[in-house]
Image: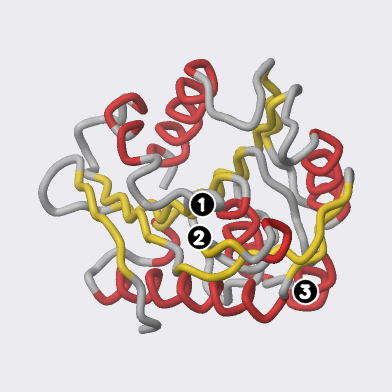
Amino acid sequence: MPEISFLELETAPEPGVAVIWLHGLGADGHDFEPIVPELALAPAPAVRFIFPHAPYQPVSCNGGYVMRAWYDIISLAPDSREIDEAGLLASRDVVRALIAREVERGIPSQRIFLAGFSQGGAVAYLSALTHPEPLAGVIALSTYIPAAGLIMRELSAANRGIPLFVAHGTEDEVVPPVMGRQALELLQGLGLRPEWRSYAMPHAVCAQEIDDIGVWLRARIAAL
């Protein structure tokens, strides 16, 4: 497994479902840990949340400042990002290793969700849509698809019908809403049917969004 540190939180012993949740640029695995109780998940099956920490690396668009990042962002534009695709693929390897670890511990891939915010959501998109075994679903928050060509070339038959919860803030100044819509249109063009939500918020997470994620996740888990 690639060298990576992470947090784990289980809602009860002997979990039968896993959620691998990727933070945004400059944050760490603690960022989304507090929302787990707010999701109001059912007592059973128990869910294991894995919150990995991205490695530290220089980020070009931030003047080379070293921070936790899933890949380097070379430049920003109002409706796109120039990124280091090798770094994106390396982060996909991390996610694949975390999935394999859960499978080894007894949770099959079809009971594993991927979630991510901003840069973490971009990794979640790529990792899920190109994963060779079926996954349970994707939660993509305030994010975008930075390397559409990778997904177009490597789209996995196993995840062509994967459930997706996609949300974006209407006042997002970091990842403009147009980029979230571009991702939505790409997904729809591939035959996927994401559940799209927008909220009157900046580049953040709001209480209504957390409630909606909880509703979606409870329904998806019940359907497994």
Q: Horizontally, is 113 left or right of 140 in the view?
A: left
Q: CA distance from mark 3 to mark 1?
A: 24 Å
Please say if the residues under marks 3 and 1 sit with CB atoms less than 8 Å apart: no
Please state which amino acid type lies under the numbered disc 3. Answer: Leu
Question: Which residue corresponds to the image point at 39% horizontal and 56% vertical from the top-left?
Answer: 111
Q: Residues within 10 Å of mark 2 (few under 14, many from 20)?
A: some
- Scheme by which the image is coloured: secondary structure
Q: Horizontally, is 127 left or right of 157 in the view?
A: left
Give residue 218's mark. none
Please say if the residues under marks 2 and 1 sit with CB atoms less than 8 Å apart: yes
Q: Which residue is farthest left?
A: 13
Position in image of residue 196 (x %, y %): 71, 32
Q: Which residue is mark 2?
A: 67
Please state which amino acid type lies under the numbered disc 1. Answer: Gly
Q: Which residue is mark 1?
A: 26
Secondary structure beneath dot 3 equals helix
Give residue 150's mark. 3
- Which image quadrant: the N terminus? bottom left
Position in image of residue 16 (x %, y %): 25, 53
Task: Indicate which disc, 2 or 1, sits on the residue closer to the N terminus.
Answer: 1
Task: Indicate which disc, 2 or 3, sits on the residue closer to the N terminus.
Answer: 2
Question: Which residue corresponds to the image point at 31% horizontal and 74% vertical from the top-left?
Answer: 101
Q: CA distance from mark 2 to mark 3?
A: 25 Å
| Viewer-closest of 188 and 80 | 80
Please state which amino acid type lies under the numbered disc 2. Answer: Met
Position in image of residue 220 (x %, y %): 47, 39
Q: Horizontally, is 102 left or right of 73 in the view?
A: left
Q: CA distance from mark 2 to mark 1?
A: 5 Å
